[in-house]
Structures are given as structure tokens and as C-alpha cells.
Image (cartoon, grey):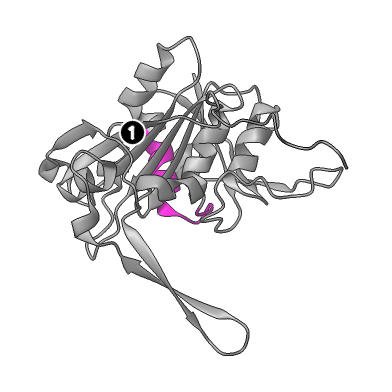
Amino acid sequence: MRVLITNDDGVASDGLWALAKRVLEAGYEAVVAAPTSDMTGMGAAIGGDLQGGDLRVERIHREDLGDTPCWAVDGPPALCVIMAQLGAFGDPVPMVVSGVNPGLNCGRSALHSGTVGAALTAANNGAHGIAVSLDVTDAPMQWETATHLVPELIQRLRGIEKGRRVINVNAPNISLAEVAGAQITGLAKWGDAAGNLRPTGDGSWSFERQPGDPKRRIVGTDNAVVREGSISVSELVGIRTQKSDLYLGDLSLTF
């Protein structure tokens, strides 16, 4: 089975190649298509000129990946997924794995993540999607911890014939030997980071990222579980409708 590997940090990110190696070592065929540059925070944006403009890609070679085809795409990760599913890099794939993102994508702030956006786009284009993120601390990045569950998750998703699933994985930045376990989690109400805006006085603003408040972490949610030393696994649902209780009978349709 072919697996598309992508990310939102671009082809220069070590996490991308750690993920690709993990998938290959598990016996799967892979194709890598990731942004040329950092596309952090792009969500499921596709960018580019899709009204007849050129979509630029460049073949890159990685000796450590052998004959695995690797591409740098001038656009966000969701565009990489769409291009793959339209046949740009061979036959469409049944599985997309996005990451490893250096930094957690927990809580409802995952909405803005390009890593998660790629996985959601996969489900919207006929493939299962897995997003993988690793906490950032003062310690070296433990890519092995973040990618450990990926082959097992791929195998389990392969057995699902009806519908397409999206899995969001967040791992603590500790060695595998230190990991307490893995838990199915809900989404926290907030991400595990906060932002502060400060006006500079010249019509622009300075944005400063700050740690989230530990007191706001809720037991059983993704960011709480990661901070407790476990790997969080959350199943996400993409765009859908719900039965509406809005009454529209008194709306005027006169223009």
C-alpha cells in the first residue's frame, strides 16, 4: 500500500523524514510531497492559483530513502494532498500521514494546523488521514516516540472499508521507555499555548507565543494526557452538518 507523507513545516524539517523512514521501515511504499517552505498555521488552505495558474513542484532526492519519490511543492500541505489524489505523483493513495510537527496540535486550536489540515483534506479526498505532532521542550526531539504508533494506526485504518477516518496523534517529547502509554482522548477546549498581541505603534502588531495555563487542562483531553507523559490519539470529524434548530420562516427574501 502506498502512503503519502507530507507536513506543514516544509522539506527542510527533520520530522518529515523521520516519519517517512518509519513508514518505509514498516514495509509500506511511500511517496513524499511536502511544501517547499514553512507553511505552519495554514490549516486546510490550498493556496496557489487554481484558476489556470501553474502549480510548481520539484523532484528532490534523499539517499537515505532509496528510490522513494520525493517532491517539494510550492504550496501548503493540503495542496500536496489534493495534487496526490489527482494523480500528480502516481496513482491516488488510500492513506496520508502528516508530520511530524515540532509542537503539539492539541485542542480546538488544531483547526489552524497545517499538519491536521492535511489529514482532514485526505478524508475529503478519499483517503484516511493521520496527523502526528511532538511536543517541543529543551530536550532533543524524540522523533521515534512521535512515529512509534504510526504503522499500527495505518494497519488498523486499512481494515476500515466504510468512510474515511482522521486520527490526530500528539506525543510528549520523552523517550519511548519513559512513555506512560497511549490514550484515546477528546479535544481540549483550548490549545496548550496562548498568544499575546502588542501594538508596535506603526500600524502593525507584535505576536508573542506563550505557554498555556496548566489549570485549564481537563482530565482525559489531549493536552492533559500529553503533559502526563502519554501519547494522545484523537479521532477527528471534518466538515459536516447537524440538524438545525434555526427558524427561517420569518426571513425576508425581498431584495
Q: Is residue 118 above or below residue 104?
A: above
Residue 26 visible in this rendered orientation of the protein = no
Magenta segment, prevailing SS (helix, strand or loop): helix
- Give coordinates of residue 74: x percent, y percent: 68, 51
Residue that extends furthest to the front in the rendered view of this protein? 250
Residue that extends furthest to the bottom in the rendered view of this protein? 201
Residue 8 visible in this rendered orientation of the protein = yes
Q: Secondary structure at mark 1?
A: strand
Q: Please state, as top left, top right, bottom left or bottom right, where the C terminus lies in the image.
A: top right
Q: Residues within 10 Å of mark 1 (few under 14, many from 20)?
A: many
Q: How many marks?
A: 1
Residue ID at (36%, 64%): 194
Q: Is residue 101 above or below residue 153?
A: below
Region in magenta? 9-22
Which residue corresponds to mark 1?
A: 234
Q: Is residue 46 above or below residue 251?
A: below
Q: Is residue 77 within the magenta segment?
A: no
Residue ID at (26%, 38%): 232
The front one of 17 and 223 is: 223
Q: Is residue 196 above or below residue 48?
A: below
Relative placement, left or right, of 250 versus 130 is right
Q: Which image quarter: residue 211?
A: bottom left
Residue ID at (51%, 31%): 238
- Give coordinates of residue 85: x percent, y percent: 65, 27
Relative placement, left or right, of 243 versus 222 is right
- Give coordinates of residue 59: x percent, y percent: 65, 44
Q: Which image quarter: residue 71?
A: top right
What kind of residue is marked 1? Answer: Ser
